[in-house]
Amino acid sequence: SDLLRNSFSSLMIIGLPDTVRLSASFGVCALASPSHSIAETIKGADAALYDAKKSGRNRVSRAGQTAPANSAEWQAQA
């Protein structure tokens, strides 16, 4: 997730000044079981995305947990 976010932020976009960098936030939710609906999973990922944005943007947040401080902590939670 850090690699994807860092790659995205390093892109040079034609028409934008060199000082402008884009960021990306992601919300992740696991399909808990076969009885868990896709709609519920998507809602969980959507809520996690808004949590990532609310927590400072440019980060990954997992559904049902607060956003970790760094990728090592995120991997430990996975």
Image (cartoon, rainbow, N blue to C red):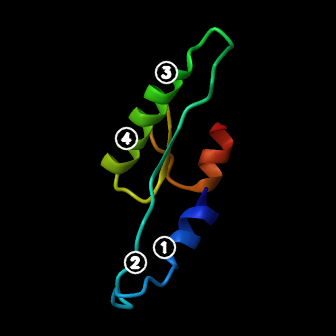
The residue carrying mark 2 is: 21
The amino acid sitting under disc 4 is: Asp
Of the pair 60 and 75, the residue shown nearer to us: 60
The residue carrying mark 1 is: 9
Query: In the image, what residue occupies the spot 47% across and 55% down?
Result: 59
Q: Position of residue 30 (x, y in %)?
A: 61, 29
View extreme (front): residue? 14
Query: In the image, what residue occupies the spot 42% across and 66% down?
Result: 23
Q: Quadrant of the N terminus?
A: bottom right
How far separated are the C-alphas under marks 3 and 4? 18 Å
Secondary structure under badge 1? helix
Q: Sequence order check: which comes first, mark 3 or mark 1?
A: 1
How far separated are the C-alphas under marks 1 and 2? 6 Å
Secondary structure under badge 3? helix
The residue carrying mark 4 is: 51
Q: Indicate the quadrant where residue 46 lies.
A: top left
User: Could you tell me if the residues under marks 3 and 1 are in contact, i.e. CB atoms within 8 Å?
Assistant: no
Q: Sequence order check: which comes first, mark 3 or mark 4?
A: 3
Q: Sequence order check: which comes first, mark 4 or mark 1?
A: 1
Query: In the image, what residue occupies the spot 49% across and 19% down?
Result: 40
Give me the disc on residue 39: 3
The amino acid sitting under disc 3 is: Ala
Secondary structure under badge 2? loop
Of the pair 11 and 62, the residue shown nearer to us: 11
User: Could you tell me if the residues under marks 2 and 4 are in contact, i.e. CB atoms within 8 Å?
Assistant: no
Q: Position of residue 22 (x, y in %)?
A: 40, 71
Q: Indicate the quadrant where residue 78 lies.
A: top right
Query: In the image, what residue occupies the spot 45% across and 60% down?
Result: 24
Crowding at label 1, few (<14), some or many (≥20) Cα neighbours within 10 Å?
A: some
The amino acid sitting under disc 1 is: Ser
How far separated are the C-alphas under marks 4 and 1? 20 Å
